[in-house]
Image: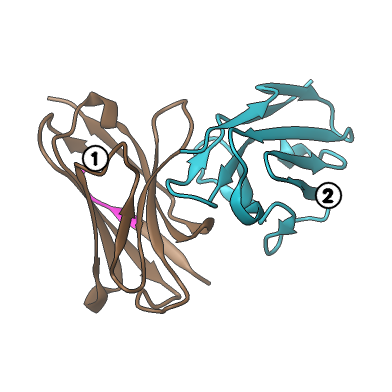
Chain colours: A brown, B cyan
Amino acid sequence: QVQLLESGPGLVRPSQTLSLTCTVSGASITSDDYHWGWIRQPAGKGLEWIGRIYASGSTIYNPSLTSRVTISVDTSKNQFSLNLNSVTAADTAVYYCARDNGALAYWGQGTLVTVSS
Amino acid sequence: EIVLTQSPDTLSLSPGEGATLSCRAGQSVSSGYLAWYQQKPGQAPRLLIYTASYRAGGIPERFSGSGSGTDFTLTISRLEPEDFAVYYCQQYGSSPWTFGQGTKVEIK
């Protein structure tokens, strides 16, 4: 059974960098069969796909965020990470990691990140 | 990017009734790569349907998906109490993946 768990600070100051990690269990993050992604959801609103990292290590991002976002993998820890820089209050949301093979079959529980001074 | 518009925004129904949810894309979704998710308060979305009509593992048969091109439908044949939730469609035929705004299925 694939499980994902997000971790990271719940509060980030404006203009700083939001950094989250997703720990994967039940699947190898290096498997050619899987890709891994991040999605976010502001309170009371819909879902926004942020981007994903392929098994090869290549990445693809939402054009609305591409100038500020980086997704990377730590194969030694079976983890992948999200960095979003120059954050503002508009980046306040629940952030989810997921196995992203297009359809998102496995999700983490989500972690709330608030951007505030 | 492909804009997805769901209708209606809210559906008020009673347990045992059927539900029909619509998702319309601004342009054709490549290869029918359209998924449906169910989300309950405080929970992550759960994948119900992928590639327009294939049920994900463990999803009851009362959930079915159909459609192609720009018009897709999620049908719940008989609503169970646990089905009252928000439903999202998502296309993954072209990047960036995009989601509809959601349809809330509420108890009448």
- Residue B81 position (above or below residue A27): above
Relative to A77, is B81 above or below? Answer: above
Numbered label attached to residue A10? 1
Specify the amino acid type for callout 1.
Gly
In the image, residue A33 lies at what x, y percent?
Answer: 47, 76
* Side (left or right) of B19 relative to A96: right
Residue found at x 42% / y 78%: A32
Query: Residue A9: within the magenta?
Result: yes
Instruction: Give the prevailing secondary structure in the magenta stretch.
Output: loop
Crowding at dot 1, Cα within 10 Å, few <14 / some 14-19 / many 20+, comes out as some
Q: Residue at x 54, y 46 (%)?
A: B45
Image quadrant holding the C terminus of chain B, namely top right
Q: Residue at x 25, y 58 (%)?
A: A81
Instruction: Please tell me the numbered disc located at residue A111.
Output: none
Whether residue B47 appears in this view of the structure is no
Residue type at mark 2 is Arg
Give how far across and how far down residue A85 sits, in percent: 15, 41
Q: Residues within 10 Å of mark 2 (few under 14, many from 20)?
A: few
Asked whether the viewer can see residue A59, the reply is yes
Mark number, residue B62: 2
Cβ atoms under marks 1 and 2 closer than 8 Å: no
Residue A51 placement, left or right of A74 = right
Residue at the image position 39 percent from the left and 62 percent from the top: A36
- Start and end of the magenta stretch? A6-10
Q: B24 or B65: which is nearer to us?
A: B24
Q: Chain of mark 2?
A: B
Instruction: Check the image and report above or below for A113 versus B95.
Output: above
Quarter of the rendering occupied by the N terminus of chain B: top left
Q: Is residue B88 left or right of residue B75?
A: left
Q: CA distance from mark 1 to mark 2?
A: 38 Å
Q: In the rendered view, would you say A90 is above or below A4? A: above
Pinpoint residue B41: horizontal percent, then vertical percent.
54, 35
